Amino acid sequence: MNGLFIMISKIDLINFYPHVNEKEINEIYDIVSLKKIHNDKYIIYALCFLFNQKNVNYVELKEENVLSEGTFSKVYLDDIYVIKKILSNKYILVQESLISKIIDHPNIFKWSKFVLDQNMKPCLMGDLAILDLYCCLTKIKNKPKLILKIFKSICKGLKYLHENGIVHNDIKPSNILIFNKNLENIKSNEIKICDFSNSCFEIMESRIETKYTTLNYRAPNNDIEHDIIYYSKCDIWSCGCLLYEMLTNDFLFANQNDIVTFSKNIDDFNKFKNQNPMIIELIKFMLEIDITKRPSCNQIIEKIKSISLST
């Protein structure tokens, strides 16, 4: 683990805000380091620092331009950009901004700046993707070579996150952005992991059980009982579920009872029958019930390299 949080220091804040007093610097620092939001007014200060912005732009968000809506946020279309408005949880707003500042990898989506809407609410702005992986599932079904090409890029992005102490904690098709509608000719850097609202930071020993992966991709509950060094292995389980869905366009586990059935007889699990055997072996490799034996992203990437497919 490299510890990307070393990049955030009070010295950086003081240099960015030379005329702000020590008490205010401490409050801003607590926000950017995800410790505590003492006062909402300092969120704007924190975001300016995280995006290296001396000025703030304003946008008018219109409901007819809503692309998607979740529990905590709405995503709007704005010309060639997308804008994410956090509806309730300010911690998520700062966390996504922080991750955009400290990461730099071709398979990770980054917000480029923050803006204020017509109600003076901070929002995040970034490049507009062509599609997400969920929209592509029917197009890649029965194309194992293309499936592994896309999946390998996802694993590369996830490997970078894990090596830097970040657990995504919500790997699923809708959180994979695609920046090329011609999937047959897609390049690795046109596939990006997004949405860090559920993420955990191993370096901070944040408790993963307080943030819930989407049910169909959620690792067995006993995972949270282990030391923080194993938190990243929850993402590996989700990747196994994701790869199965890419292969079949169906959920591997509809509920936790399916995991119990799977764990009792992995080799004869009904959903694995009549599927590409090499990819099924790769999926089983990731779905090791014992979290301490589950592979790393690097091991998965090496496994993908060893698979030879003609189509």
Image (cartoon, helix red, strand yellow):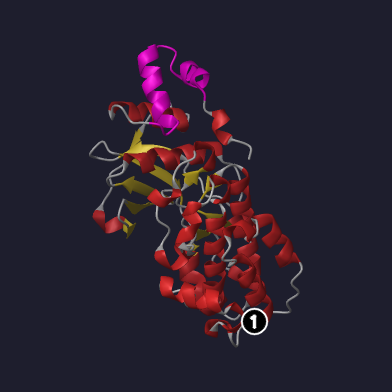
Horizontally, residue 56 falls left or right of residue 129, namely left
Instruction: Indicate the position of residue 81 as horizontal and vertical percent values.
Output: 42, 49
| Neighbourhood count class around disc 1 (C-alpha, 10 Å): few under 14, some 14–19, many 20 upward | some
Q: Quadrant of the N terminus?
A: top right
Q: Look at mark 1 in the image and give the residue it sits on.
A: 276
Whether residue 20 appears in magenta in the rendering, the answer is yes
The extreme left residue here reads 119
> In percent of the image, x 54 and y 33: which residue is there?
5
In the image, residue 306 above or below residue 24: below
In the image, residue 293 above or below residue 164: below
Residue 150 visible in the displayed image:
no
Q: Which residues are magenta?
A: 9-35
Q: Quadrant of the C terminus?
A: bottom right
Residue 99 visible in the displayed image:
yes
Horizontally, residue 196 falls left or right of residue 268, namely left
Label tally: 1
232 or 37: nearer the viewer? 232
Whether residue 75 appears in magenta in the rendering, the answer is no
What element does badge 1 sit on? loop
Give the residue type that dot 1 points to: Asn
> In percent of the image, x 61 and y 83: which residue is there?
275
Horizontally, residue 125 falls left or right of residue 121, namely right
Instruction: Indicate the position of residue 276 as horizontal and vertical percent values.
Output: 64, 81
